[in-house]
Image (cartoon, coloured by chain):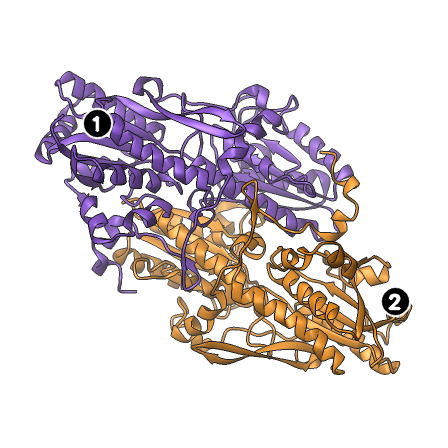
Chain colours: A purple, B orange
Amino acid sequence: MASGNIIVAQSGGPSVAINASLAGVLAAAMNNDNYNTVYGSVYGIIGVLEDNLINLTEKANEDSSFIDTLKISPAMYLGSCRYKLPDYEDDDAPYAFIFNQFAKYNISAFFYIGGNDSMDTVLKLSHYGEQIGSDIRIVGIPKTIDNDLCVTDHTPGFGSAAKYVASSVLEIAHDTFIYSVPSVTIVEIMGRDAGWLTASSALARNEYSPAPHLIYCPEVAFDKNAFVEDVRKMLTKYSNVIVAVSEGIRDKDGNYISASTAVNDQFGHSQLSGTGKCLEYLVKETLNIKVRSIELNVLQRCAAHIASKTDIDESFLLGKNAVSYAEKGLSKCMLTVTRTSNAPYTIEIGTTDIKSIANKEKNIPREWINEKGNDVNSAMIEYLAPLIEGETNVAYKNGLPIYLPVGHLSSDPSDRKDY
Amino acid sequence: MASGNIIVAQSGGPSVAINASLAGVLAAAMNNDNYNTVYGSVYGIIGVLEDNLINLTEKANEDSSFIDTLKISPAMYLGSCRYKLPDYEDDDAPYAFIFNQFAKYNISAFFYIGGNDSMDTVLKLSHYGEQIGSDIRIVGIPKTIDNDLCVTDHTPGFGSAAKYVASSVLEIAHDTFIYSVPSVTIVEIMGRDAGWLTASSALARNEYSPAPHLIYCPEVAFDKNAFVEDVRKMLTKYSNVIVAVSEGIRDKDGNYISASTAVNDQFGHSQLSGTGKCLEYLVKETLNIKVRSIELNVLQRCAAHIASKTDIDESFLLGKNAVSYAEKGLSKCMLTVTRTSNAPYTIEIGTTDIKSIANKEKNIPREWINEKGNDVNSAMIEYLAPLIEGETNVAYKNGLPIYLPVGHLSSDPSDRKDY
């Protein structure tokens, strides 16, 4: 193939590992004679549409630690977007513009790192490219803490988020076990539709701590009465009960368990309450016990100081492989991870047609959740355990982790320094 | 002095450093011929009243890594309590019982590790001991993430909590800066009466991130209109504004800023809303912008995997010094830290009469907060910066930090294993 340049972009929600894939693309391209400059598109595909590109090759040449620090920095170095391309049959203007941009910058490969919605963009660009007979490789690199992409064994970003969730639940258990007063602690975990991250709280269990004592995922319809009964029963065995619950649990009719369903009648406006708060009030009301709810919130996806080394290394490797697959001519695809063995844990990296990924979702198999729907079983634990293994070596300065600033901010620091 | 035994106990809220002081007491006593066995009292002073003691010397002899792992484990190894002794003039029965226990176990020194309420117990036991002519040393060892004890420059546990708060705000900033859509993020931080921990969020600032853009501590009366104006103004300069706010902020009449004051009229029941949620709704209502609130919650005080080495080392040293001070005859006192230099950071350990500590509180000096009351100034930053320096070497197993189980649980594991 003739040598050319690369554009890479990031999209969707942040994660701890998405910059590792970006670093992998950059590292591989700089070691490959068929590729010259790697451009980063600011704010996802928007950067291509607005001609807002960062020369990443230049950055890496200027700073020898750039790639290593990028690899362990949280969120998107290039910024993100939630932009959905129109169908090109309805409106092909953005497509024509994007492929003009590709020509202008002599692009031979475009990489999009993201989750489900981002793969929709990869699919649409692939279709359009095919239509106009373009030979530019369009490749998706997976990323989502939700772990809900099909075909791939798991997704970059998930392992680190799972490690954060499990560590936090363990530390919350220590915090809770010190009092003799019985208590219930509800930990609300991200995952609107898939319970993978909530399930990973089970990794917190060890020889002295059974926490979380109960786990509720959105894959099983949530029953308020059964939940109260589960907690009541657990309190007969344990003084301090910790419950892991997905933000996305729904009742059998598909209604989210939030203020509007469980608390509204008694406490008023539903907007004030998330799932954890809702269960907190439910427990208080029914069991009259000390209860607290904790929302792990965005730290699940940005606490890079406790990233999983397995996750970061795999994400980096996916980025590198994306470049070599593109060079070999693969396009209209997403990189995938196949688990070849669980003990010892080994994987193979491959690709899948983008059509098998975009706009589809992977949920927890029902048989990995126990019959009552209040815990996960050993198959789930075996699947999860290798993904949180290993620690990255985050360096610290002045007591804080050293990360790379978000790229588009550092490119115009004058705008940001006057505080 | 004649050789004797030690009882040590922990009380109040958990922290990341309180076990380091316990480890210090144990390490020093085991190296001191004047002391034989160190007993740990389970659930604070309650353990003495209920004759529930753990032989810590035995534990350390059985396991050579016991003291080192104890030093970096979160929350109270011995469990905690919120028990307040009655005045002995009103009821001296518990006092008589406690000093009987001391005699029974041949105790020559009693150490209580805790915050304000715990020092009240030290004061009362000291008074009673004086009254009955006891020569048992009664010594307090400070601990509180709130940093609100008088005389001592700062308190063990605070530095680690401050490091967690600053790191989290930095990581939240990365998470927030990736979108081009303007937003406001409210971070609610612990501290009912003193704003030290909220102020420590300022350490998150670096050359690329001005977050938190605004800081509100309970030391200054909170004005809703001024707050909205502050945020509005900040949004003209910055696209993504992060606000650090203490859970304990109050208006000029002393009312907490929670649902009941700011949100109640429109949104209903006050119990559903904390300070962060309240400000979230206030911003949404007045500025009509994307807004989110994050409550850092108990992880501030239990995330031992990101403890401050300075904090852990000082806490250990305070425990060690407590033993040598007791040996020298000091009693009715609390250990203190005096800062002898800020750059380089050096401290001296001393003691102060327990009367100057118990039931008193230390707030942020008004001059360390800016005139408008929406930020801290450089004197505050200089004070805080050394306290979060350094990282401990927490070991990991199966991807999770290795901690010591809470002692009273591990002593009866059969009760805990059947999940």
Q: Is residue B52 left or right of residue B375?
A: right
Q: Residue at x 62, y 55 (%)?
A: B73
Q: Given the image, what chain letter belongs to the residue carrying mark 1?
A: A
As helix, strand or loop, the secondary structure at mark 1 comes to: helix
Q: Label for residue A327?
A: 1
Q: How many marks?
A: 2
Q: Is residue A89 above or below residue B288?
A: above
User: Toward which corner of the image does residue A157 lie, by quadrant?
Assistant: top left
Q: Is residue A391 left or right of residue A228?
A: left
- Distance between mark 1 and mark 2 Cα atoms: 77 Å
Disc 2 target residue: B105
Q: Viewer-proximal residue, B259 or B82?
A: B82
Q: Position of residue A242 (x, y in %)?
A: 65, 41
Q: Amino acid at mark 1?
A: Glu
Q: Residue at x 70, y 38 (%)?
A: A286
Quadrant for the N terminus of chain A, please: top left
Q: Amino acid at mark 2?
A: Tyr
